[in-house]
Image (tube, rainbow, N blue to C red):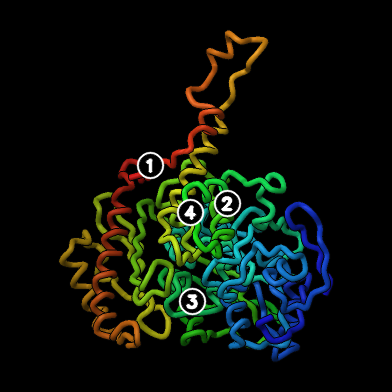
Amino acid sequence: MKVDLRINGAVRSAEVEPRKTLLDALRENFLLCGTHAGCEHGVCGACTVLIDGEPVRSCLMFAVQADGYEITTIEGLAPAPGELSVIQDAFCETHGLQCGYCTSGMILAADALLRQTLSPTREEIAEAISGNICRCTGYGQIIEAVQFAADRLRKANTPRPHHGVHAAQAEHDAPVEGVLEAAEADEPVAEAK
Amino acid sequence: MKPAPFDYVRPGSLAEACRLLAADEDARLIAGGQTLVPMLAMRLARPAKLIDILRLPELAGIRQEKGAVIVGATTRQAQAERDPVIRAAVPMLARVLPWVGHPPTRNRGTIGGSIANADPSAEIPLVAVTLSADIVLSSADGARSIAADDFFMEPMVTALRHGECVSAVRFPVWSHKRVGVGFFEISARRSDFAFVSAAAQVALDEEGRCIDVALGLGGVGDRPLRLDVSSLVATDLNAASVAEAVNAVLAEVEPTSDLHASAAYRRRVGVTLCIRALEQARANAAAISRESAR
C-alpha cells in the first residue's frame, strides 16, 4: 500500500506492506534511524516518536495507520544540521546517557512534557519517562537532564529587555535572569527535594 | 517484519466496518492497537484482515445525557484522563486512568479497546463493573446494550458475538452532591498488571451518613467483581462497620492463585485494599463541604 506520511514537517511517501510498523518504515524506508528498535512489542519505549506532539510507540502502530498525523522523530528536534536542541544538549551536559539506545525516546518523551510545562515536578518527569526503559543510567541523570533543560527553557522564555531606543525603560523592564545568564549556567540544577 | 501478513482496510462508516467484520471469520478490529499489535508481533494473533475503526466518527466523543456519561469506544485513554466531563461526572474513571499502562500507551490506547480486551486485572473494566455501566455493541443489524457484569465472562472472553463491535460505554452518573471515589492496586511495578485492585464510590448525605456505595475488586478472578456492601448504607462508614462488611463479602470470593500471588495473599490484600478504597472514597466525599452540597 502507498502511504503519504508527514514526518518532521515534510511529506514523505513509500510503498509498504500493511504489516510494516511505523518504526520499520521510519528506519528502512525513510532512513530515519534515530528511532530505535528495542523490544518491538511495546514494552521498552526505544521507538518513541511524537504523533501530533504526543509520545507514542512507533512499534505499536502500522505505517498505513500513520497518515494525517504530524510525526516527529529525534531527527526533527535539532534546529539545524550539526546543532542540538536544548533538551539534547542538556542530556549531554548532565551525562543523561551512556549507551544511547533509549536516548532518542527519552528526549522525545521529555520534549512532549516540556511543551506542557516548563516547571515539571520530579514526579511529573518520572511519570513522563515511565514508559521508557534505560538499562545504563539508573534514571537519576536523565531526570536531572530534563530538569536542567526545563530550567534553561524557562530562562530563555523570559522576556528580553529592549535595548536601544528606550534604554531607560528597558532597564526598568529587564528581568533578573535572562538568556545570557541561561547560556552561562553550565552547572546542572540541584535536584528538587 | 514481525507480524504475519494481513490485509488492511479502513472503512468510512461503522455500518461498513460491521459488514466487513461479519463477512470474514478471520478479520479483527483494530483501534489503538496497544494490545493487539504486541499479539500480532508475537504471532499470538494472525488475523487475515485488520479493520481499522479508530477514525470512525460514530465511535468518537464523550457526551453527557440524563444520568449518564457516554464514552465513545475510540476515546483515547489519555483524552478521557483529562476530559472535564469525565473528571466531574465519572471521577472513578479519571482516578484509575493514570494506572492504565504508560503515557505513550494511553495516547493511543482506547477505552473501548480495554473493554473489548477484557483483561481481568485491567482498571477500565473494573470501573465499568463497579459502577454498573452498560456496554453498547454495534453490528450490521443495529445496536444492543449489555450490563458490564454480563459482558465480561472469562479472561479475554466477552459476550461479544461474531460481527459485533464495542461502540460505547455508558457510565451511570450519581446525582448526589457529595460523591467521592477511592482506588488502590498492588502490582510488581507501577503500570504493570494488578495482582489485586479495589475501586470504591461513596455518596454521603449532609450529616456524613452513607446514602449509596459501590465497591469493585479486580485481578482476583476471571473477571472484575462488583461486591455488594449495601449493608453500609445509612452507616457513617466507621472503620468497624467497613471492616465487617468487607470481610463478609470477601469471604464469598474465591481468588485465583498463580505465579505472582497465592489465593490467600489475594484475599488478604483484597480485604485491605477494599477497606482503604472505601475510606478514601468516604474522605473525598466528606471533603465536599456541606455548604456547597446544599
Q: Amino acid at mark 3?
A: Ala
Quadrant (top left/top right/bottom left/bottom right) for the N terminus of chain B: bottom right
3 or 1: mark nearer the eye = 1
Question: As displayed, is residue B165 above or below residue A161?
Answer: below
| Host chain of mark 3 | B
Q: CA distance from mark 3 to mark 2?
A: 35 Å
**What amino acid type should be assigned to the residue bearing mark 4?**
Gly
> Mark 3 — residue?
B148
Q: Position of residue B202 (x, y in %)?
A: 33, 61
Percent x, y of residue A170: 58, 14
Chain hosting mark 4: A
Residue under label 2: A112
Which amino acid type is marked by label 1? Ala
> Considering the numbered disc 4 on the image, is that residue within a helix, a strand or a loop?
loop
Amino acid under label 2?
Ala
Mark 1 lies on residue:
A190
Are circles 4 and 1 on residues that touch, CB within 8 Å? no
Q: Which mark is in front, 2 or 1? A: 1
N-terminal of the pair, mark 4 or mark 1, is 4
> Quick one: quadrant of the C terminus of chain B?
top left
Identify residue for label 4. A96
Query: B45 or B110: which is nearer to us?
Result: B45
Secondary structure of residue under mark 2: helix
* Alpha carbon separation for disc pair 2 and 1: 22 Å
Q: Residue at x 77, y 69 (%)?
A: A29
> Considering only order in the chain, which callout, 2 or 4, is on the residue closer to the N terminus?
4
Say what secondary structure mark 3 lies in. Answer: helix
Above or below residue A88? Residue A167 is above
Of tags 3 and 2, which is closer to the observer?
2
Please report contact status of discs 3 and 1: CB closer than 8 Å, yes or no: no
Q: Is mark 4 in CB contact (under 8 Å) with mark 2?
A: no
